[in-house]
Amino acid sequence: MDLVRLTAAAVLAVQDHQGTGLVVTYPPAAQVALDRITAVCLLEGLDTPASVPALLKLCRSHLSKWPISIPSDYTAPDTVLVDEKTGLPTHACIEWASSDPSSSRPVPTDELLRRLAVNCPSSATYEQCRDFLIDHPVVNQENMRTVHATPGGPATWKRVQQLYGPVAHAYARDGQCVRCSFCGCLAVTLRDKISRCESGVCPDFTARHEVPVAALRALPTEVRHSLSASGRVEREVRNACLAAGAHVELIRDVVDHLRITWPFGDVWLVVFSTSAEPALLARRFRHWTPHHATRVCVAVPGHIVDRRTDYRQVFERHRGPGSVELVRAELVTAGNHQTDGGEPRA
Ligand SMILES: [Zn+2]
């Protein structure tokens, strides 16, 4: 598993590498991944990727086609690390890169939010800043003008602006970028004039409004992927729960989650995710065991769960005993007595 994680990290490092000059160099992470995978292949008498470009080409193949053996729980039917058409790291690649078998290291988004919270004087301020990040994975001049015209906007921008950085060249075509018309993340235009969102979740689209790459600032790749989409799901669920009469709070802990107190007294702690990798997802939360709750859940949108027929079974195999349970995000709002299967909870 460590080889996949290292290779995924190498893909992200290459994407973010802003090399200049005529001499092609690769970031150290790429060479480390190549060396490690080559060593394993040589020991086992397998074909080795001969170079960093060969390793990156391998990343466009399904994990089951790799020379090393990877357990099937980690190989969803469509899992590749690099999208064949866009050349961008996939959502799975980003999950792999930020995974940690020991769960001892926070994922980049949790770490970024932790640092943001330290700089906020109150929970309300933190939530305003966090909402801004959810709504703006990428910002342009117009976004900044808008936020400065909003009450409290300048103070929010002052706290979050350092979290944004330049957009990687991989997203630019002739110096121009396209943003997803659904979620605002970065997108890439394919040869047939269709644009594809980097998230891998949004539908392809044709409407294009190109902007110079230098005019955009973006959150780190892992944060764009994990915070924006799951944050919007969290907001929908929160609003529905409030409409149902529940009391809802955002709780800062090892990971941000909602504490939902239903009118009849049950307390749910719910963290939201759009992970397509149930084994990695379960392992991320296997040591998260908060107290004083009726249920502790990780909520994933149903359309993502349904992409893989054994999503729930894989999650169950990798979660720790007595820890977080999996629930479809829609059921948090619709049936506070229902399990994932839609049947009454015992
Ligand atoms: Zn999108």
Image (tube, rainbow, N blue to C red):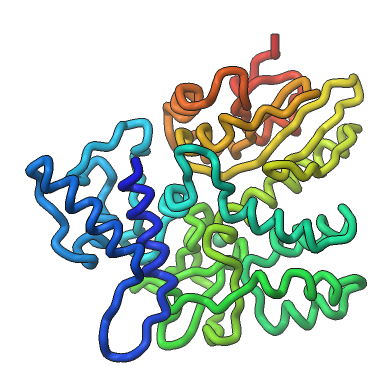
Instruction: Give the image quarter of residue 332.
Output: top right
At x 58%, y 61%, the residue is 224
Residue occupying the point 58% across, 48% down: 106
Total residue callouts = 0
* Residue at figure coordinates x 90%, y 71% from the top left: 152
Residue 204's x, y, as percent? 47, 61
- Outermost residue on the left side: it is 45
User: Where residue 105 sits in the image (x, y, percent)?
Assistant: 55, 46
Q: Is residue 52 left or right of residue 287?
A: left
The residue at 23%/60% (across/down) is 55
Q: Is residue 241 left or right of residue 218?
A: right
Residue nearer the viewer, 139 or 328: 139
Q: Is residue 67 left or right of residue 228?
A: left
Q: Is residue 176 above or below residue 205?
A: below
Query: Along the line of sight, which residue is nearer the eye, 10 or 42?
Result: 42
| Quadrant in which ligand 1 is drawn | bottom right
Between 152 and 331, the residue placed more toward the observer is 152
Q: Position of residue 46 (x, y in %)?
A: 10, 45
Q: Is residue 20 above or below residue 40?
A: below
Q: Quadrant of the C terminus?
A: top right
Q: Is residue 70 above or below residue 176?
A: above
Q: Give the image location of residue 263, x and y in percent.
A: 91, 25
Which quadrant is home to the N terminus? top left
